[in-house]
Image (cartoon, rainbow, N blue to C red):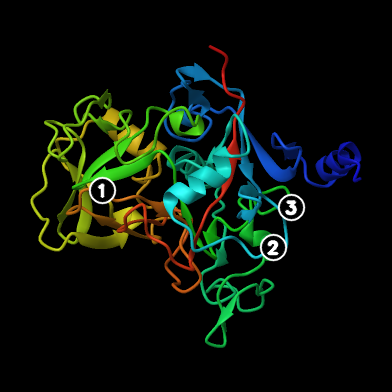
Amino acid sequence: MPNFDLSSLALSAVCPGNEILFDDKGMPSIMVKIPKQTYAQLGMGESTAVHPAFIVNGQEVSAIWISKYLNIVKNGRAYSLGAQDPAASLNLETAISYCTAKGAGWHLMTRMEWGLLINWCEKNSFIPKGNNNYGKHNSENNYKAIPSYISGGQTNRTATGTGPLTWYHDNSPSGIADLTGNVWEWMGGIRSVYGELQILANNNGADSSHSQLAGGLEWMAIKADDGSLITPNGTGTTAGSVKMDWISSKLTYSTSITDTARGEHGCTFGNITCDSTISDAAKLLLQSIGMLAYNATGLCKDHYCYFNNNEAERSFFSGGSWYYSSYGLASFNGHYSRTYVYTLIGFRSAFVVLPSA
């Protein structure tokens, strides 16, 4: 039997902040610990309030742990291990089930957690690269990762964590790997309904007791004039809620939708904007979940994003895949339903110590 205490000690010596965490079957995953941080620490203004990723069930948590690697699946459970072909071709609910099967606190990474990482990387002036050009990053001709899935004679997926340090979120061996490219990652805690953006409160998506089913009762719309959460009416027309409009060839948040003719739209992250109906408080919440740039001229400004404002429910995945050079950390895709399955969509689990009641 492996000595996991010694393995954890060796891992932390080489990769500070990395830990081996065990699920309720005693099986290991390599995780990256992200300590609690405030808006001010993330460069999002001067507020000393904690980022919502660190609020679960109304209480602050001291840290969250993100899978260092895109996950694989063994015996119906998600695991974060290096040099593996990442799991793909699974729908949203299957991805959630592989994560929550591991025990209390394990969950599909939420968009609130992804937004935290976007803002952390912007604050620290480093945006990770990754496999967005058939096995390499479009800007790195000399760096490649180990192919793990080849189709049509071209590298598609690459083995987890086998890219250069520039593919880690902090440009070091301690970082989270492959957040950019390789495979899109299903996101928990977010969806749209006929273009109305809906989320679970704070980071409640980290607790499996909060349903993320299509008919779940905890989905909330965002009130545009103060950023609070309100109960949606179910048709995407909740009065005063934040909605995704398409104006002047870009995603524009508004309390109304004027263009649903095409439904599917796309623009760069830096071009996403708000009209005058969206308050600063609502903007801050959108920035917290990485659906609006805190700085429109930031390092993620050219990452391409998609949404759909003409369907009953659309789910989101993040980070891009292997075939488009404009995919990056801030890329998101909300074109598809929760049942969508494709070879370029995978997932990543995360963990939080759930607050006691």
Spatial CA distance of label 1 from label 3 is 38 Å
Q: What residue type is labelled 2?
A: Gln
What number is the disc on residue 173?
A: 3
- Name above or below for residue 55 compared with residue 350: above
- Give the mark nearest the N terminus, 1 or 3: 3
Look at mark 2 in the image and give the residue it sits on.
84
Look at 41% across and 36% down and name the residue there.
288
Q: In which quarter of the image is the N terminus?
A: top right
Closest to the observer: 28 or 286? 28
Mark 2: few, some, or many residues within 10 Å (few <14, many ≥20)?
some
Q: What element carries label 2?
A: loop
Q: Residue furthest front?
A: 75
Q: Quadrant of residue 9?
A: top right
Residue 121's spot in the image, x, y percent? 54, 46
Left or right of residue 11: residue 195: left
Which of pointers 3 and 2 lies earlier in the amino acid sequence?
2
